[in-house]
Image (cartoon, rainbow, N blue to C red):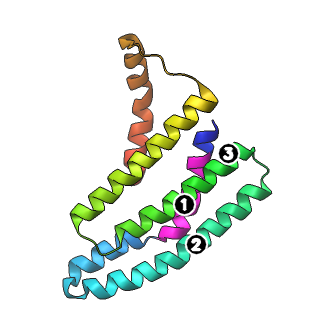
Amino acid sequence: MQFRIAIAFTGLFAIIANFGMNNYIIRELARNKEQTSEYLTNVSVIKFILSFLAFGFIVLTINIMDYPRDTTYAVYLFGIYMIFVLFVIFSGYGLIELAYAYIFVGIVAVSLSFSIALIKITKPKLTIDFSLWKTLIIGSIPFALNANIFLS
């Protein structure tokens, strides 16, 4: 539950950090490719400022709301992750570097999540239950559809 709270909480503030610029910059760069460098530089500076502003709001709000310490730390980590991902997108590097950055961040996130799960939640069982798979897949369909509708 705390993990979901941390992700959702950070996601709310990611709206401030992004400020709709991802979609806007894609449209503008499709129209004016010769201005790519100028756009990327300026968007990076704006996102830098907005990201730290959003992180400040995250820290302030999570501390006011009196969540448990583990949840608060998880929110801090996801806030830092949010800042890193937003910068990687518009850092001006090529596609390969962007892919490597996502892989690196993904490995760090999975490692931290797995470590926290081992320490705080439960030890994994190395058994596969295909009847549980069916329940999990069918139960997650509405959430997948909802995510795809709102992300499109």
- Position above or below: 5 against 21: above
Q: Position of residue 43 (x, y in %)?
A: 40, 80
Mark 2 and mark 1 lie on one chain; the one further toward the N terminus is 2
Q: Which residue is mark 1?
A: 80
At horizontal 69% and vertical 43% (from top left) the residue drawn is 70
At horizontal 34% and vertical 80% (from top left) the residue drawn is 40
Was residue 14 drawn as part of the magenta stretch in this picture? yes
Label 2 vs label 1: CA separation? 9 Å
Mark 2 and mark 3 lie on one chain; the one further toward the N terminus is 2
- Disc 2 and disc 1 in contact, CB within 8 angstroms: no
Badge 2 density bin: few <14, some 14–19, many ≥20, Cα 10 Å: some
Q: Secondary structure at mark 1?
A: helix
Horizontal placement of 45 versus 92: left or right? right
Please identify the dominant SS of the magenta region.
helix
Q: Secondary structure at mark 2?
A: helix
Was residue 8 drawn as part of the magenta stretch in this picture? yes
Horizontal placement of 91 versus 9: left or right? left
Instruction: Using the image as rendered, state which of residue 98 and residue 16 is in the foreground.
Output: 98
At horizontal 56% and vertical 29% (from top left) the residue drawn is 118
Say whether residue 111 is visible.
Answer: yes
Q: Where does the magenta region start and end?
A: 6-19
Query: Which amino acid type is shown beneath numbered disc 3?
Result: Thr
Q: Which residue is mark 3?
A: 71
Query: Which amino acid type is shown beneath numbered disc 1?
Result: Ile
Query: Which amino acid type is shown beneath numbered disc 2?
Result: Phe
Mark 3 and mark 1 lie on one chain; the one further toward the N terminus is 3
Q: Which residue is mark 2?
A: 52
- Position above or below: 115 against 29: above
- Disc 3 and disc 1 in contact, CB within 8 angstroms: no
Badge 3 density bin: few <14, some 14–19, many ≥20, Cα 10 Å: some
Label 2 vs label 3: CA separation? 20 Å
